[in-house]
Image (tube, helix red, strand yellow):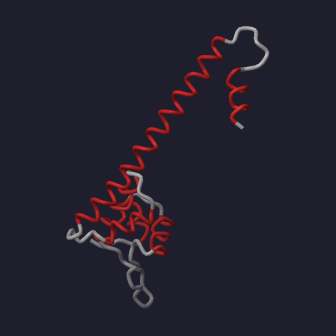
Amino acid sequence: MSYTIGSLAKVAEVPIETIRYYQRRGLVSEPAKPLGGIRRYDETHVRRLRFIKRAQSLGFNLDEVADLLALEDGRHCREAEQLGENKLAIVRERIAQLRRVEQALTELVDQCHCNTGQVHCPLIAALEQMA
């Protein structure tokens, strides 16, 4: 099956400008344009776009996606595993940070509930002290 860039965008569920951006970044190839014709994309382009979007949904940035794409022949599983482990460590650290933020905000909001008649809000006072 062949696609115009518009039909490719629909099938892959990405905007046309995203496809063009990925082409400029070297993540997606741009087929040759026949003289007086329209570029035609195929299923490999659909798979590539879906791969990129899935990787992004897992938190990989485009540079990391490019690294994964360079390993896509399936013979570099160790390198792909290392990239995955690195991303997992970053995600776990973010989760830990978010838990710390959640705990701090919970305590500050709880202090606001207990603030009866005080002039200064405990949440705002804490943020002023942090600055």
Question: Position of 74 compared to 96: left or right?
Answer: left
The outermost residue toward the top is 116
Pick the residue in front: 25 or 102: 102
Q: Quadrant of the N terminus?
A: bottom left
Indicate whether 54 appears above or below 62. Answer: above
The outermost residue toward the bottom is 35
Question: Position of 57 compared to 77: left or right?
Answer: right
Residue occupying image coordinates x 54% and y 33%: 101
Pick the residue in front: 35 or 124: 124
> How far across and how far down the image is residue 37, in percent?
42, 85
Pick the residue in front: 71 or 15: 71
The outermost residue toward the left is 75
Q: Quadrant of residue 48?
A: bottom left
Residue occupying image coordinates x 64% and y 11%: 114
The outermost residue toward the front is 129
Number of dots carrying numbers: 0
Indicate whether 87 appears above or below 96. Answer: below
> How far across and how far down the image is residue 47, in percent?
30, 65
Residue occupying image coordinates x 20% and y 70%: 75
Residue occupying image coordinates x 41% and y 47%: 91
> How far across and how far down the image is residue 122, in percent?
69, 21
> How far across and how far down the image is residue 123, in percent?
67, 24
Pick the residue in front: 108 or 31: 108
Q: Quadrant of the C terminus?
A: top right
Question: Position of 24 compared to 122: left or right?
Answer: left
